[in-house]
């Protein structure tokens, strides 16, 4: 039923009032910032928050409006694929048809620097939640039209961008081969030097949600894409550069929002690309 509020996201189709596109962030503070609800008034510079829909379980969501009246949902997926899979399922149920993930990432290629953005065209998907959506061998690929729109926007805005393959894995520490910053210093043999192994496969970066998002998009008939702020250069160190993180997040948000604003949704229906 249209008025039914979904259990986890805390709102229903009637609350969206026709909005079909969502910007999805793992961090609830980023979702608030995108929607014009940042605590610092100086950061409320892109969208005006029309209303808060829910803060159930920390999955904050907002309807926000561009100056010309176009509206978008800014929502929180939580950390990792299991949480994202719940949110995306319920977003699809209430009428969302396009989703851009706006996340953070660590690069594993020497020419992909902190402060830039990575736009994922597909993912090496090592995620249990994705296996419940489709078989392991099922492609985890982004919507091509939405992905190209992100690239064109990044070019137009002068943001340093990279496009390519992303490694989507379930864990932040062991699964990404972190040993210096992890409590567990004893990685399983196959995870030792995993970043170098993936580097040789021309994978650009690690993150924790895109692969499952892409599989869900193809199975559900949604247009999905992902842009991530590069906040660490794993070829150099495991640590996050906080200053470059701010720059990269700002760039990723700018590109995602401008893409949504300018988007021609003609070719985003699944019938054109499934």
Image (cartoon, rainbow, N blue to C red):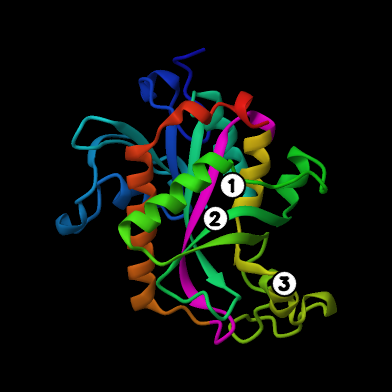
Tell me whether circle 1 and circle 2 mark residues in contact (CB < 8 Å): yes
Q: Residue at x 24, y 39 (%)?
A: 49
Q: Alpha-carbon distance for marks 2 and 3?
A: 22 Å
Name the spot of residue 230 as percent of width and height, x first.
Answer: 47, 69
| Upstream in sequence: badge 1 or badge 3 | 1
Q: Position of residue 155 (x, y in %)?
A: 38, 57
- Mark 2 Cα-neighbour bin, 10 Å: few <14, some 14–19, many ≥20: some
What span is in magenta?
219-238
Q: Which residue position holds label 2?
A: 79
Residue 79 percent coordinates (x, y): 54, 55
Q: Is residue 64 visible?
A: yes
| Residue occupying the far left of the picture | 42
Task: Mark 2 and mark 3 in contact? Answer it, CB < 8 Å.
Answer: no
- Looking at the picture, tell me which residue is in the foreground, 102 or 274: 274
Q: Is residue 192 above or below residue 70?
A: below
Sequence-first disc among 2 and 3: 2
118 relative to 49 in the view: left or right: right
Number of the label disc, if any, that sits on residue 233: none
- Residue 214 inside the magenta-drawn segment: no
Question: Label 1, on which residue?
Answer: 83
Other residues around mark 1 within 10 Å, as few (<14) / some (14–19) / many (≥20):
some
Q: Say above or below: 62 vs 101.
A: above
């Amino acid at each position: 039923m249209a008025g039914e509020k979904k259990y986890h996201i805390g709102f229903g189709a009637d609350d969206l009032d026709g909005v079909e596109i969502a910007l999805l962030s793992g961090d609830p503070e980023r979702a608030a910032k995108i929607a014009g609800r940042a605590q610092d008034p100086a950061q409320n510079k892109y969208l005006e928050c029309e209303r808060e829909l829910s803060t159930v379980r920390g999955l904050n969501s907002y309807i926000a409006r561009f100056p010309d009246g176009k509206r978008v949902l800014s929502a929180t997926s939580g950390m990792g694929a299991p949480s994202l899979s719940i949110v995306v399922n319920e977003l699809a149920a209430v009428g969302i048809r396009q989703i851009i993930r706006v996340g953070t990432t660590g690069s594993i290629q020497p020419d992909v620097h902190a402060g830039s953005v990575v736009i994922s065209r597909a993912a090496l998907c090592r995620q249990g939640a994705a296996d419940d959506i489709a078989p392991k061998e099922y492609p985890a690929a982004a919507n091509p039209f939405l992905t190209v729109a992100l690239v064109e926007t990044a070019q137009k805005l002068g943001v340093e961008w990279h496009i390519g393959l992303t490694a989507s894995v379930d864990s932040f520490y062991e699964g990404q081969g972190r040993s210096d910053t992890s409590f567990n210093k004893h990685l399983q043999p196959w995870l030792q030097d995993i970043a170098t192994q993936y580097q040789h496969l021309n994978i650009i970066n690690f993150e924790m949600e895109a692969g499952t998002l892409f599989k869900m998009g193809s199975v559900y008939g949604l247009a999905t894409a992902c842009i991530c702020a590069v906040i660490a250069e794993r070829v150099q160190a495991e640590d996050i550069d906080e200053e470059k993180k701010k720059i990269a997040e700002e760039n990723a948000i700018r590109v995602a929002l401008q893409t949504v604003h300018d988007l021609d949704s003609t070719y985003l229906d699944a019938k054109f690309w499934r």
